[in-house]
Amino acid sequence: MLFGWVSLLLCNISPAAVPGQFIAKMYTEVLGRAPDPTGWKGALGYFEPNGCNATLLQTWGSQFFTSTEFNSLQYDNDAITLILYRAILNREPDANGYQHWLGVLNSGTPLASVVADFFESSEFTQSVSSICSGTSYSFNNLGTGGLAIQIPASGAGYSGLSETQLQTLLDQTPSGGTVQLQQKSVVYLDTTLYIPDGVTLTTYGAPTHNQHAFMARLVRSTPFANALVNVGNGTSSAALTNIWVDGQRQASNSYVLAAINVQITGGTAMTVSSNFISNSLGWTNVHGMGPLSGVQCNGYTISNNVITAYPAMHAGVTSEYTDGISVGCQNATIEGNQIVDPTDVGVVLFNSYPNVQQSIVSSNTIVSAGHSAFSALAYDTYYVTSPPAPSPSFAGASITSNTLWSSPNSHFIIGLAVGSLAWWGDRQSSGIYADIGSGASATDNTTAGILTNFGEGIAVSGMLSATVESNTFTGTLIPQSYTNCPIGNVLASVSAGYASGSIQPYTDTTVIDCMSDFGPN
């Protein structure tokens, strides 16, 4: 069925021999970025006709370590050894193994030979069936590694710090100052680390996410029920930049709802930028609090981060989902982030009542590689108020020019959700909830021509006076048995009174209180 702007084909999804999460991990763990559309299409072109086995995985994966892009990162052997474990063996290195392979590289053994040894190891071979299933194989599911280990740090900056020492250092830094950690240093956290107002925490030399193995690393060492890092005291100008924030969730961890990776708790001009953020143990990776959370805020910048959620859960669990970025501040800039395998929503913009939500979500990439998700991009209009208050305004908010796609074996229940009645239903009749917003814009979002599995490409339900235009998705519709929500290309709850505005060609269907996923992944 061709619609000009979108091609969505209704058919059953059959398992394809495409190891989507392996593909994504080669990009994020080796190159420090999400796959680009061209690279993803190239991977599909390799695995779809050939299948998936140990030899094919080795042939395709090895090329990352000999690529011009990898060589340009100028990693030392300390960092390369860490990457080999995480990318190929899918775990943190154990101390003895790390020292062995570091010694092998330091002795002059060519990297290509060491890469071959990793791919030909019994440990990798044992993981091939999980990788080739096309579903998630989590992180550290078959390995023997535990908590991230200390590796040799280098360069200027602070190193060898305990959490208490780092917190004291941050607290003693005057407003406008910067604390620089040594490259590859590791700090273990068993309580929240607080970055005070006016202070920046960064890695010396400001390695970008492409060089994440050079970044200083903040590691959750216990499953305490709070954010791993808190940015600011609610006043102004705290910043977290060029840091690896690692929630250490693994297949065996218990989910802890509040154990998120990064939280901004109000204030102005707060920044979370150019970080590598992985494996949140809780409901999101980055939370920018706003009025919905009882704080005042203005002008958050959340940009150019790589965020991965490989061990998050989606299929077969209840309420153990993880977002990529979740923001309630009314004037936030959320741009250039690369998010892989969120299991709830990639980027969700909450309302900012009583303020007008005017945040911009632009030029982000959301990839469903091994996990399905409820949505890639969403406006969430839900809030609780008593007595009843007017519907929240999103006039000036924009979700624009973002790219999203799924693997052949995963899906989004809703690709782009403009309003959140699919999750919450219409609860205004109770007198304490308001679930219908107004004024949001969603334009020029795309799947970059990659065939993507959707329940609904776009759903407008819970947003009046919306602008939803020029979104270009190419996809396949999942079977109705996967979800209680209606299936379709663009669905808008117009006759029900839950949607209005300028909406690209749509089917008038009520989408309400139906969010569910009974699919295989």
Image (cartoon, grey):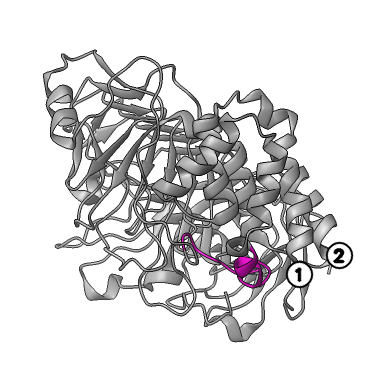
Q: Is residue 179 left or right of residue 381?
A: left
Q: Residue 276 at what x, y percent from top left?
A: 45, 38
Which one is in front, 358 or 226? 226
Q: Residue furthest front?
A: 107
Mark 2 residue type:
Asn
Residue 351 numbered mark, or none? none
Secondary structure state at the residue bearing disc 1: loop
Tell me if label 2 and label 1 are in contact, CB under 8 Å: yes
Comes first in the chain, label 2 or label 1: 1
Can you say which quadrant of the picture contains the C terminus? Answer: bottom right
Q: Give the range drawn in magenta.
A: 125-140
Question: Furthest-bottom residue in view?
Answer: 481
Q: Which residue corresponds to the image point at 57% horizontal and 63% vertical from the top-left?
A: 123
Question: Within the magenta stretch, is there residue 126?
Answer: yes
Residue 316 lies in the magenta-colored region: no
In the rendered image, which residue does mark 2 sit on? 50
Residue 439 visible? The answer is no
Q: What residue type is labelled 1?
A: Ala
Where is residue 501 shown, x and y percent of the image? 56, 54
Marks 2 and 1, Cα distance to the nearest angstrom? 8 Å
